[in-house]
Amino acid sequence: MIVIAGLAFEARIAAGSGLRVICSGDGKDLAAKISRAITRDCRGLISFGVSGGLAPDLAPGTCVIGSAIISSSGKHFTDHHWSKRLLEACPNPVYGDLMGVPEPVADPSTKRALYAATGAVAVDMESHVVAGVAAARGLPMVAIRVVTDPAQRAIPRTALAAMRADGSVDLMSMMRSLVQTPGDITGLLRLALDARAARSMLRKSRNALGPLFRVPEANSHEQGLAEKFGLHGTTRTNHAPFGFTPYLPASTLLAERRAFQKAE
């Protein structure tokens, strides 16, 4: 199984036996990195880390289990059965759509606009890439995200300027930025408290999920079919809004393939 995180501390929290963790950092070539990491026995992909709140009632530290991932390219549904197991394990989770974007969403007006346009409850920069690879490779995918900055709160420019690609802080850049915008200090202190709440909940959620993130056991018959046909046990059809549908078992794919062969 492969866990994809955006920041170094997220990757450290996610790490465990039987898992491969990819830290996207600046996000460059993330899809290619994930694809290269997928092996024949890969059981699924997990998007794991913090997020920005879009729904106005989500407080810092709220755990969100993604029901679907929305991006400019469409909508990918997460694996329902696996997501249900996550909901049963995580502390007080919210189940809702996540928005995937290439850049940080820092101001409340943009957050409000995204929420109004999509209904997504939170936003991050990795889940849409993970979902796209999962759809292309026929793998189940889930998303576990914890809110850091709530919808009504802006991320100070100083914080954005000082953050490195892996999520660590460049103190010299922060000090230079604070000299120019000393009013950011209040926002930075608030953001630090929000981030502390998010990290705490991320650790609690990870501990609650156990070594393998509650991944469902594969049905032995479907697993055999998947191995026979070079599949990973699930696939998608293309008859739903946005071009995506929930996963279908490999046995369903086999029936469709036989019908197609007869038609030929």
Image (cartoon, grey):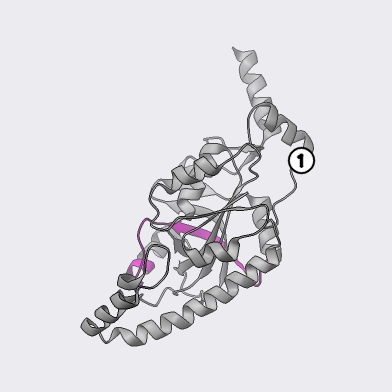
Badge 1 marks a residue whose secondary structure is loop
Which residue is outermost to the left? 180
Image location of residue 116, percent across then percent down: 40, 63
Up/down of 259 relative to 85, above or below: above
Up/down of 150 relative to 211, above or below: below
User: What residue type is disc 1 on?
Assistant: Asn
Image location of residue 120, percent across then percent down: 47, 61
Which residue is outermost to the front? 172
Left or right: where 114 falls relative to 221: left
**Residue at 53% of width from left, 65% of height from top?**
10
User: Around disc 1, counting alpha carbons within 10 Å, would you say few (fewer than 14), some (14 to 19), or many (20 or more)?
Assistant: few
Quadrant the C terminus occupies: top right
**Residue at 36% of width from left, 83% of height from top?**
187
Residues shaded magenta? 90-111
> Along the line of sight, which residue is nearer the eye, 42 or 58?
42
**Residue at 70% of width from left, 57% of height from top?**
214
Image location of residue 170, percent across then percent down: 35, 73
Which residue is outermost to the right? 220
Up/down of 68 relative to 35, above or below: below
